[in-house]
Amino acid sequence: MPALDSLRREIADTEFVLVGANEDRDVGAARAFMNRLGFDFPFVLGRGSLRRRFHYPGLPYTVLLDRAGRIAGRWIGFAGPQQLRTVRALVRSEVDRGPRQSVRHRHGG
């Protein structure tokens, strides 16, 4: 998480958004954990329901979505520096593509 927070800070002036998720059932403990680590990105409180809802086998679990909301990458566990390089490259690629263009549908007439 510190490496992802660092990436978020590096590209904070873009449309890139990092959202954390905490699975702790105890909301107070979850908030204390995030505050203790000093992260200032938004996070959702799973209250013990995220694993059942998203079917991941364990933590940490990282999902990178593209601008269209499609999964661009998914990692279970932490694979070290190579994983961070891959995440960084995918994020940079998406950021460099620019804002998603809206599609206008025209009807004949």
Image: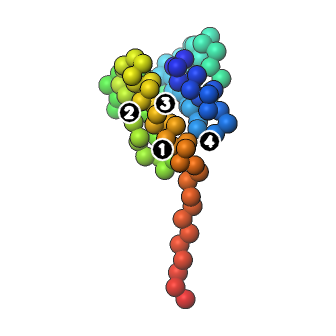
Amino acid type at mark 4 = Glu
Q: Is residue 52 left or right of residue 101?
A: left
Cα–Cα span, label 4 and label 2: 20 Å
Q: Which of the two discs, 4 and 2, labels the residue nearer the N terminus?
A: 4
Q: Nearer the viewer, residue 71 or 91?
A: 91
Q: Residue 23 at x, y = what percent?
A: 47, 22
Q: Which of the two discs, 1 and 4, labels the residue nearer the N terminus?
A: 4
Q: What's the mark number on residue 15?
A: 4
Image quadrant where residue 83 sits: top left
Q: Residue furthest left?
A: 57
Q: Residue 9 at x, y = what percent?
A: 63, 26
SS at circle 4: loop
Does 96 sit above or below residue 75?
A: below
Amino acid type at mark 2 = Arg
Can residue 49 be spotted in the picture? no
Disc 1 marks which residue?
66
Kindly report which numbered mark, 1 or 3, lies closer to the viewer in this rendering.
3
